[in-house]
Amino acid sequence: MLVEIEQRGVMELFGYRSAARLLEHLADTPKPAAERLIKRARLVNPGRNLDGTPVPALAPATGAAALGGTVEQPDDPAHLRSR
């Protein structure tokens, strides 16, 4: 969803220069964490160029594993408590 928000320009609609800044304010997330989430989303999800041509995910297998719940999420507080 983060990649889709970024590609469709939703952040500009609300006056933000980047999807990370939008996420930072809407989700009350620290800026470094928001930037990491956006970067991770770009890597594991396919996207589109400005002209509409598809951009494949750089790590599609990781994206599929994350979607299936088999990849640990380092920013997840529940994950940190379980150790």
Image: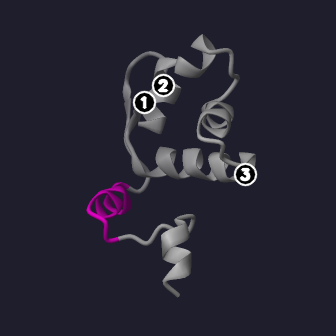
Q: Earlier in the sequence, mark 3 or mark 2?
A: 2
Q: Amino acid at mark 2?
A: Gln
Q: Nearer the viewer, residue 44 or 33?
A: 33
Q: Secondary structure at mark 3?
A: helix
Q: Main secondary structure of the magenta part?
A: helix
Q: Nearer the viewer, residue 43 or 23?
A: 23
Distance Cα–Cα, label 3 vs label 1: 20 Å
Q: Secondary structure at mark 2?
A: helix
Q: Position of residue 63 (x, y in %)?
A: 36, 56
Q: Position of residue 49 (x, y in %)?
A: 46, 25
Q: Position of residue 67 (x, y in %)?
A: 30, 57
Q: In the image, 18: left or right of 41?
A: right
Q: Residue at x 65, y 42 (%)?
A: 28
Q: In the image, 82: left or right of 39?
A: left
Q: Residue at x 59, y 21 (%)?
A: 11
Q: Mark number for residue 4?
A: 1
Distance Cα–Cα, label 3 vs label 2: 21 Å
The residue labelled by disc 3 is: 32
* Residue range (magenta): 60-70
Distance Cα–Cα, label 1 vs label 2: 5 Å
Q: In the image, 66: left or right of 29?
A: left
* Residue neighbourhood size for the residue with mark 1, other residues' Cα within 10 Å, grouped as few (<14), some (14–19), many (≥20): some
Residue 25 covered by magenta stretch: no
Q: Nearer the viewer, residue 24 or 59?
A: 24
**Do labels 1 and 2 touch, CB within 8 Å?**
yes
The residue labelled by disc 2 is: 7
Against 46, residue 53 (above or below) is above
Q: Earlier in the sequence, mark 3 or mark 1?
A: 1
Q: Residue at x 48, y 27 (%)?
A: 5
Q: Amino acid at mark 3?
A: Pro
For the N terminus, give its image quadrant.
top left
Residue sitting at the far right: 31
